[in-house]
């Protein structure tokens, strides 16, 4: 699990004002989690990361093995059912439960997972990172929340402060 503490004075100030008003932040943080997951899902379908940059294209060898040119991340059920969040009185947790999630987020080198029954590398080639979750930084950190995600959090909190 990766933990990111938002160290934005604007977000902290909004949370402080909101907590004074509501007492329990979980309804507002529920909306934050839902907004972050929806934006993540939109990015997957658009083939873009949280900075608005295109995901790494598939390699020629990968394209030869599958139909279409969209990155593998846009296929299957990752965007439709494997993204989730939970909110409490003081935090929001986002997750992706697909077995491929960490590899898609951070990438993997050929052979990083050992060998298969036939002695071939797993994966057989390098897999480029396609950072679909609102996390900046490599697999080993440090991690931060992208500016676009911070702006989305502020927008959701501002709606609650109206």
Image (spheres, rainbow, N blue to C red):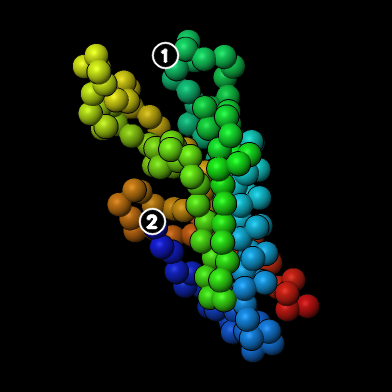
Please indicate, yes or no, whether residue 60 appears anywhere in the rendered image: no
Q: Is residue 91 above or below residue 109?
A: below
Residue at numbered disc 1: 61
- Circle nearer the viewer, 1 or 2: 2
- Residue sticking out furthest to the right: 162
Q: Quadrant of residue 161?
A: bottom right
Q: In the rendering, at what x and y percent does residue 83 appear?
A: 56, 47
Q: In the rendering, at what x and y percent does residue 143 appear?
A: 39, 58
Q: Quadrant of the C terminus?
A: bottom right
- Residue sticking out furthest to the front: 117
Q: In the rendering, at what x and y percent does residue 32 appear?
A: 63, 64
Residue at numbered disc 2: 1
**Is the residue marked by circle 2 packed among few (<14), some (14-19), or many (20+) residues within 10 Å?**
few
Using the image as rendered, state which of residue 122 and residue 145 is in the foreground.
Answer: 122
Using residue 129 as the reference point, say whether residue 23 is left or right of it.
right
Q: Residue at x 45, y 69 (%)?
A: 5
């Amino acid at each position: 699990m990766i933990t990111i503490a938002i160290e934005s004075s604007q977000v902290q100030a909004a949370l402080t004002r909101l907590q004074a008003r509501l007492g329990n932040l979980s309804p507002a943080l529920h909306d934050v989690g839902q907004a972050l997951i929806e934006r993540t899902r939109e990015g997957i379908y658009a083939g873009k990361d949280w900075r608005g940059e295109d995901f790494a294209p598939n390699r020629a060898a990968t394209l030869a093995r599958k139909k279409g040119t969209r990155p593998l991340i846009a296929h299957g059920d990752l965007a439709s059912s494997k993204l989730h969040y939970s909110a409490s009185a003081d935090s929001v947790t986002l997750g992706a439960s697909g077995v491929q999630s960490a590899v898609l987020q951070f990438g993997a080198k050929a052979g990083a997972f050992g060998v298969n029954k036939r002695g071939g590398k797993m994966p057989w080639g390098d897999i480029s990172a396609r950072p679909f979750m609102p996390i900046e930084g490599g697999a080993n950190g440090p991690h931060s929340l992208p500016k676009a995600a911070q702006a989305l959090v502020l927008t959701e909190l501002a709606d609650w402060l109206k």
